Amino acid sequence: MSLFRDFFITLSNITYLNEMAKKIGPTMGANRVVAGNTIEQLIDTIERLNAKHIDVTVDNLGEFVNTKAAATQAKNEILEIMEAINKYQVSAHMSVKVSSLGGEFDTELAYQNLRDILLKANTYDNMHINIDMEKYNSLSQTLQILDRLKGEFRNVGTVIQGYLYDAEKLIDKYPELRLRLVKGAYKENDTIAYQSKKDIDKNYINIIEKRLLNAKNFTSIATHDDKIINHVKQFVKDHHIEKSTFEFQMLYGFRNELAEEIARQGYHFTVYVPYGNDWFAYFMRRLAERPQNLSLAYQEFISTEALKKIGLVSGLALGTLTLVSSIVKLLKR
Ligand SMILES: Cc1cc2nc3c(=O)[nH]c(=O)nc-3n(C[C@H](O)[C@H](O)[C@H](O)COP(=O)(O)OP(=O)(O)OC[C@H]3O[C@@H](n4cnc5c(N)ncnc54)[C@H](O)[C@@H]3O)c2cc1C
């Protein structure tokens, strides 16, 4: 399956495709995993999830930010979302990416933008701000920024990627921070990251257990993997770990029934809700993780509405989907 993974991760990194995709807005099934591109649509989604006792972390989509103006715009959009969360009194916080705030070209600018976001969050009842973790080549920059901010703010946390050999060291480094634990979504090489599902799952379980036993702050276990979720449920029971100290998280649009069932069982549950026009790289990473998600793309693409939007991106996407579908058929033989 790594052929699929590499293919879609490569697509996610093509700036030109990302730019074109922004112009046509979420399509090809992305609108099932992205909560629209207006504040009204976003608040409506949050309210629907909150009604099912599910919290939300909002991701204002935006990658390949390479000017100061674009980074400032991204910050202002995040502030606007936070204002709406506060105004409508919905249960939600923010997930932000250093790259979308200027990190790709100016670390100090990204730090200042994040600091502005945290200052505003403080006025909104210490709204939590999670710094998402991106590719390995930005890890040390993200941690440098985090280390500066955590001295000043208590409502900042980050993500540890279980595929990294260093994941356990990072768990040990930040017991006092609110952390989200994930398997890891990017393509990294074997000098820094485990490659097989078996090794990644093993290290992921290892860091989850270590964290839950030693945490001095809240932990989010973000996975759609029912084997891991069941393992965690048993582990916390065996070790008398309070349900109030951790939660499960999933991405918007995936495994909705399982998410609702876990919330009904009395576990904290948060859904990660991507929002905005810059949907392409995010959606390609989701296809990379799970080729079955292609059926979303196919169903949507052949609908009349999507065909009306046909253009360069759609044409490319159709080509891509056809190619991948042929590969799937070949592999099934
Ligand atoms: C809330 C959240 C935030 C995240 N933040 C980050 C981040 O900041 N940085 C980062 O690198 N990554 C992030 N990720 C992505 C993460 O690293 C993984 O790439 C992604 O979650 C896929 O791995 P998985 O744990 O869900 O399990 P996988 O290994 O993809 O799947 C394991 C098994 O789970 C089941 N399964 C998975 N998905 C489905 C489905 N849709 N329907 C039915 N069964 C399914 C299948 O049995 C599958 O074999 C985040 C993920 C989540 C959920």
Image (cartoon, rainbow, N blue to C red):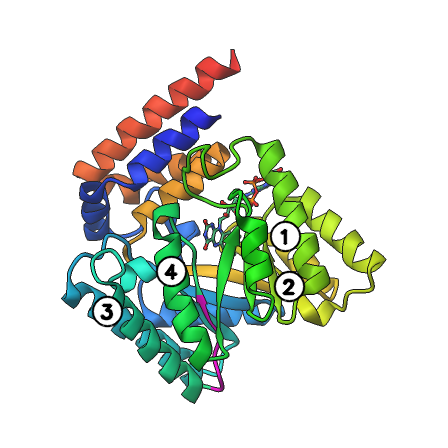
Amino acid type at circle 3 is Leu
Q: Residues within 10 Å of mark 3 (few under 14, many from 20)?
A: some
Q: Are marks 1 and 2 in contact (CB under 8 Å)?
A: no
Q: CA distance from mark 1 to mark 2?
A: 17 Å
Closest to the observer, 310 or 155 = 155
Image position, residue 155 (x, y; %): 49, 77
Q: Could you tell me which residue is drawn at 37 percent across and 83 percent down?
A: 119
Q: Which mark is residue 142?
A: 4
Q: Which residue is mark 1?
A: 257
User: Which is in the foreground here, disc 2 or disc 4?
Assistant: 4
Q: Which residue is mark 3?
A: 109
Q: CA distance from mark 2 to mark 4?
A: 24 Å
The numbered mark, 1 or 2, whose residue comes first in the sequence reads: 2
Amino acid type at circle 2 is Glu
Q: Which residue is mark 2?
A: 247
Q: Which residues are magenta?
A: 125-130
